[in-house]
Image (cartoon, coloured by chain):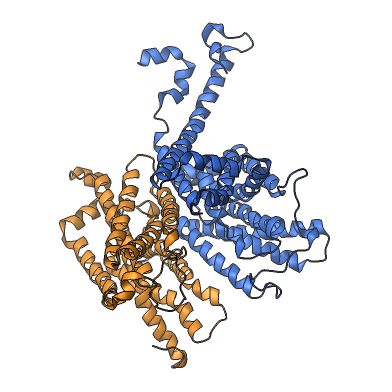
Amino acid sequence: MDATEIGLWGVPLAVLGGAIRVSTPFIFVSLGEAITERSGRINLGLEGTLVFGAMTAYAVAVMTGSPWLGLIAAAFAGLCFGLFHGWICRFPKVNDIAVGIALMLFGSGLAFFFGKPFIKPKAPNLPAIPFGGWSDIPQVQAALDVNVLFLIGAVLSVILWWAFRNTRAGLIVRVVGDSSDAARAMGLNPDTVRLLATGVGGALAGIGGAYLSLYYPGSWTERISSGQGLMAVALVIFARWNPLGCFAAALLFGGAGALGPALQSVGVTQGYYMFYAAPYILTLIIMIATSSPTRTLAGAPGELSITK
Amino acid sequence: MTDTMTGAGMPALFSAKAYSAAVEWIARRAEALVIPLAALIVGMALFSLFIVLVGKSPILLYETMWRGGFGSWFSVQNSLSRAAPLLLAALCVALPARLGLVVIGGEGAIVLGGVAAAAAGTALSGGPSSIVILAMGVAGMAAGGIWIGAVGALRHYRAVNETISSLLMAYIAIALMNQLVEGPLRDPASLNKPSTQPLADIYRIGNIPGMDVHWGLVVGVVACILSWLLIEKTRWGFAARIAGGNVRAAQVQGLAVGPLIVGFTALAGGFAGLAGMLEVAAVQGSANASLSAGYGYTGILVAFLARHNPLAIIPFAILLGGIDASGGLIQRRMDLPDATVVVLQGMIFIVILFSETLYGRFKAFNPDLWKRPDLVKGAA
């Protein structure tokens, strides 16, 4: 898909290709956040989890030579961050949004702290492989092709959509999210359910981070995420907490994110920075368009602090 | 107040009523003082553990931090210079917080305030310095005020979550700054680092006499004091505190919550914009990418440490300014990454938020028990 040879047609093609490539972390983070928010809690710290997941995956992949171990390590790290958020929010008067902000700072700080030795110089816009395992073994690189994680994400969103409606676990999460009192009356402990939901959400965000550093853009830098975790949180609201909606919205956001590089590849350099800001602007416009001061959002979990 | 002033041994100078009022005054504030300080110490202790785990000496670290932040007159001045923008950035979080809003996008207002101030300075170049500096301040405050005021307006009139929208707008603001600084506002002479036209020396803000700290520190402290007066001593502040406690109750009382939210967020953004103007006029000399130095994000931590009390922001901004200032020395002396201070800040932040759960849990802070010592025995 060489954009320069086919002229301006390269833009929609590159946006489409980019949508699939860029959307994958959005899919995982937004699915994770959808689980967390359906249980009645919001974890803004997924931005930090995403960055820490990216660093962990990259570091483990460098040291072991296996990107899959990196992926598992990132998911585990994300699980720990999520469980920590869930645990600390159990205490009365602790604000889940503020804890999320703190974890955003803490996760990024920790990632930069441990990630320093893993920053290697690398030319932009080249899928060059900077180190060990996945440069020497082409199969590994092929195995971590965009399609694998992207497809897993697609399947996962269908499974979650189905599970929320048809499984006991899905029902439990929804009950806890809609009414703590109703959940207690059913003999459920809302704090425990939220702890687990936040943990799972963190693990998925960690996988999203692994995709960032191990596939696209495929290197570890301190600017690797720049707000993608946060946009994914906003995306969940737009998707009305529906996993299928999350998948569609992630594709849309991926396309918006690919707009800047696509236009640049055909020689449009005017407004370069603003095209890079397109996903943020799109998120904001969508938030404004879909929020309403007079009615509660359809599908909003009753216990969620941001929609109360 | 000392221990000897209990019961009958009290000096005649104080009436019993004045004494009990004084004890109550102290007890009410002791909780607000002791819990954040204890949280700060616990956060630092946890960070020591972290430093031990990565194989370094926490004693050396805190010694280096002290030396880099407050150990010499030079480092104190460095810390105070960094505290100046933090004071204003923290107000950008604290003022909306009194209305129950969590605004975390102050970085965007700082960046745009700096660009607007630089543009105003360039446009008015040639005018009298006092008027140009004033215009730059107004431009910076206006840009920041519009940016964060919009966040408040979206919150109230469209129910858009202010935490997410303000952070998204910070990213947009940084893109806007890059676009302007590399495009229409670019000084052709700035090759490696795109910047706006450098300000002439007469339009720069100088240092406080006898110190190597620019006047921004005074501006920041005055802004904190004025904000405190606004919140505690005016009817607008009173209305804001009611609306922050319960929006519905405020609306039932006939308070105009919408204008209140827009006004407070605009003022908050104005302060952050002023921080950007000061960075341009006193530190950088022009607007460029260095404007986004993270003061907006550290300001969030300062505001939460101060529990959104503008007067408490002053000491915490100086403390965080010192921690910030010591980052470079820690990096060089101890061979630790520059993100070390971010890890410390994150840990303190988490412990501070956790400490919210402790308020009202300790009998020692209950003023009723202090006023009536006999009740302690009776209650026990």
Chain A drawn in what color? Answer: orange
Query: Going by the image, does A47 lie left or right of B18?
Result: left
Location of residue B129 (image quadrant): bottom right
Query: Going by the image, does B7 lie left or right of B136?
Result: left
> Measured from the top left, where is residue A63 in percent x and y?
33, 62
Question: Could you tell me how many numbered marks the image carries?
Answer: 0
User: Which residue is located at x 62 percent, y 71 percent?
Assistant: B180
Q: In this view, does A300 lie above or below B301?
A: below
> Measured from the top left, where is residue A294 in percent x and y?
42, 58
Query: Going by the image, does B179 lie left or right of A98?
Result: right
> Measured from the top left, where is residue B343 in percent x and y?
45, 49
Is residue B15 or residue A129 the one in the foreground?
A: A129
- The blue one among the chains is B
Is residue A31 or residue A105 the one in the foreground?
A: A105
> Measured from the top left, where is residue B159 in percent x and y?
45, 58
Is residue A59 in view from this perspective? yes
Query: Going by the image, does B20 lie left or right of A76?
Result: right
Is residue A299 in view from this perspective? no
